[in-house]
Image: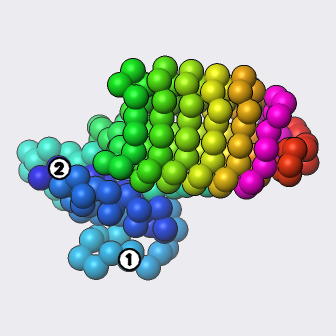
Amino acid sequence: MTEVVLWGGTGHSRVLRELLSHLGMVVPAVIDNREIEAPFAGVETIRGIEGLKAWLDRRADGSIKPSYALAIGGGYGRDRLAIANDLDDLGLPPITLVHPTAMVASDAVLALGSQVLIGATVATCVRVGRCSIINSRASVDHDCVIGDGVHIGPGATLCGQIEVGDGVFVGAGATVLPRIKIGPDSTVGAGAVVIKDVPAGSTVVGVPARLQKAQ
């Protein structure tokens, strides 16, 4: 049975564990940089990268190293990418997850460590970057390019031919109109309707979306 460790022990870890169980995979451990209450009975909770190294050393008996999935949602895409680099350095392979109820076009490209969750749609000619999340019921239409460490929130809609830079967070229920560019490390507020390009490092909210903060 495939083992997958989860980095992150809050709500998103429960979502991923349910999906992994549905796919016939098991979670032997949860890692978090913080002191947290064990999220799952019978699953070991590990503190940080040093704790993970010690745990792997205890298991160094020739067994196959587990894969990993990053259970860190929200606007923490850069953190996901940094943690992924650390786990890659330890020789743990990232797992790309697609919920059985999601619809992913045959020619869509999902980079390593990406997640397409329950009821989401990824249309034709879409590229989804490394460690990016397409959350529940989100829709990414044709020819969109999603960067690394992006999170498209639940129920958000990207209408097609949209470029989303690295580290972007698109909030729940937001709508981005076609051919828009969203600069790296930007945030689109929940329910916003984006009708023009978003500068890097910006926060936009409202209908239509207006700039709240920029670098």
Residue 59 appears left or right of 43: left
* SS category of the residue bearing label 1: loop
The amino acid sitting under disc 2 is: Thr
Residue 74 percent coordinates (x, y): 61, 54
What element does badge 2 sit on? Answer: loop
Callout 2–callout 1 Cβ contact below 8 Å: no
Quick check: 206 left or right of 95? right
Quarter of the image for residue 161 reads: top right
Q: Left or right: where does residue 170 sit relative to residue 195?
A: left
Q: Which residue is mark 2?
A: 2
The location of residue 149, given as percent across then percent down, is 56, 39
The residue lying at 47 percent from left, 46 percent from top is 120
Amino acid tagged 1: Ala
Q: Residue at x 17, y 49 (%)?
A: 2
Q: Which mark is residue 87?
A: none
**In the image, which residues are magenta?**
190-204
